[in-house]
Image (cartoon, rainbow, N blue to C red):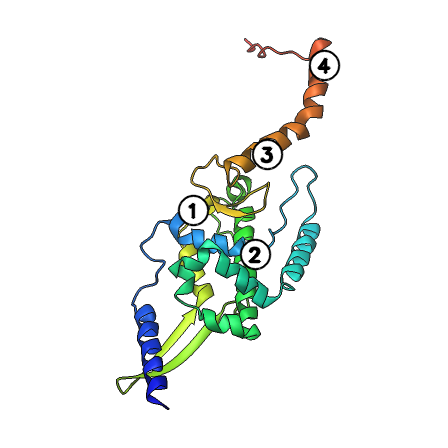
């Protein structure tokens, strides 16, 4: 090895250990919204997972079929194309993800890039499943009984094991991006994780009455809800005009 190559490797190793030599995860001691926001942006790089149909409730099998079709579709996205999209998003500059990946290798090698894309699929799938399971009616029905949201039997993450020699001593490093995501998710109030009914993006609800990810989407949601109920309102208006609907409160029985 030439002196130039040795110096370059030493500089890389110093920066590498500087970023990874820590006792605590970068996601610790942060507010739940701050911990999850980069992962939500990461998941939202993909086409939105299918939303539950409120107007015409569908069977559980139909829901599963639609979600499986979504998963098959997003797993066909070219891995290097997804990496390029990641580099252009705001999450690419947040240390929760960048601290544990080798972006140069992801750009050059389709194999780890495929794992990186599949990680986004698993994160989006997990967050979307959590958003559905945290519906108030579902939580009320579960009561104090623990509610299982998802189980992954195969490691979905971009994991990397490294062995280094530093100052004559062997040092090992294990990084697992999905494990970092789980740390960010731990302890979060379930109803804060929601999926926008308009654009499909996953977002963190700062208020319990926040139904959409933005003011624009919320305005569209209200218009859609009004249009869905328009026929019913028109029917009730006709009944009222005909005197067939009692508008006052019912009298209490003595």
Which residue matches tag 3? 220
Q: Nearer the viewer, mark 3 or mark 2?
A: 3
What residue is rendered at 56% in x and 62% in y?
Answer: 82
The reply to whether residue 233 is in sight is yes
Local crowd at mark 4 within 10 Å, few (<14), some, or many (≥20)?
few
What residue is rendered at 41% in x and 64% in y?
Answer: 98
What residue is rendered at 38% in x and 50% in y?
Answer: 34
Image side of residue 5 versus residue 211, left or right: left
Asked whether the residues under the numbered discs 3 and 4 touch, taking CB atoms below 8 Å apart as contact, a structural biologist would say: no
Please tell me whether mark 1 sits on a helix, a strand or a loop.
loop
State how far apart marks 1 and 4 are (Cα).
44 Å
Which residue matches tag 2? 125
Q: Nearer the viewer, mark 4 or mark 2?
A: 2
Quarter location, residue 171: bottom left
Local crowd at mark 1 within 10 Å, few (<14), some, or many (≥20)?
few
Marking on residue 239: 4
Question: In front here: 188 or 205?
Answer: 205
Please tell me whether mark 3 sits on a helix, a strand or a loop.
helix
User: Which of marks 1 and 2 precedes in the sequence?
Assistant: 2
Looking at the image, residue 233 lies above or below residue 254: below
User: Which of marks 4 and 3 precedes in the sequence?
Assistant: 3
Question: In front here: 21 or 58?
Answer: 21
Which residue matches tag 1? 189
Please tell me whether mark 2 sits on a helix, a strand or a loop.
helix
Q: Quadrant of the C terminus?
A: top right
User: Which of marks 2 and 4 precedes in the sequence?
Assistant: 2
């Amino acid at each position: 090895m030439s002196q130039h190559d040795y110096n370059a490797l030493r500089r890389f190793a110093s920066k590498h250990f500087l970023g990874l030599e820590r006792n605590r995860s970068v996601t610790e001691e942060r507010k739940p919204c701050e911990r999850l926001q980069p992962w939500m942006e990461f998941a939202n790089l993909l086409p939105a997972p299918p939303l539950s149909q409120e107007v015409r409730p569908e069977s559980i099998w139909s829901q599963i079929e639609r979600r499986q079709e979504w998963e098959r579709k997003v797993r066909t996205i070219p891995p290097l194309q997804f990496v390029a999209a990641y580099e252009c998003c705001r999450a690419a500059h947040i240390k929760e993800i960048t601290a544990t990946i080798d972006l140069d290798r992801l750009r050059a090698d389709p194999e780890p890039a495929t794992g990186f894309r599949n990680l986004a699929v698993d994160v989006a799938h997990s967050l979307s499943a959590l958003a559905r399971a945290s519906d108030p009616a579902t939580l009320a029905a579960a009561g104090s009984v623990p509610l299982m949201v998802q189980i992954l039997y195969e490691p979905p993450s971009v994991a990397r094991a490294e062995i280094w020699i530093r100052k004559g001593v062997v040092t090992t490093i294990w990084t697992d991006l999905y494990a970092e995501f789980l740390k960010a998710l731990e302890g979060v109030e379930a109803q804060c994780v929601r999926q926008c009914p308009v654009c499909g993006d996953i977002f963190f609800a700062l208020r319990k009455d926040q139904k959409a990810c933005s003011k624009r989407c919320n305005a569209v949601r209200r218009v859609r809800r009004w249009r869905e109920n328009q026929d019913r309102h028109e029917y009730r208006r006709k009944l009222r005009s005909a005197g067939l609907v009692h508008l006052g409160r019912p009298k209490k029985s003595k």
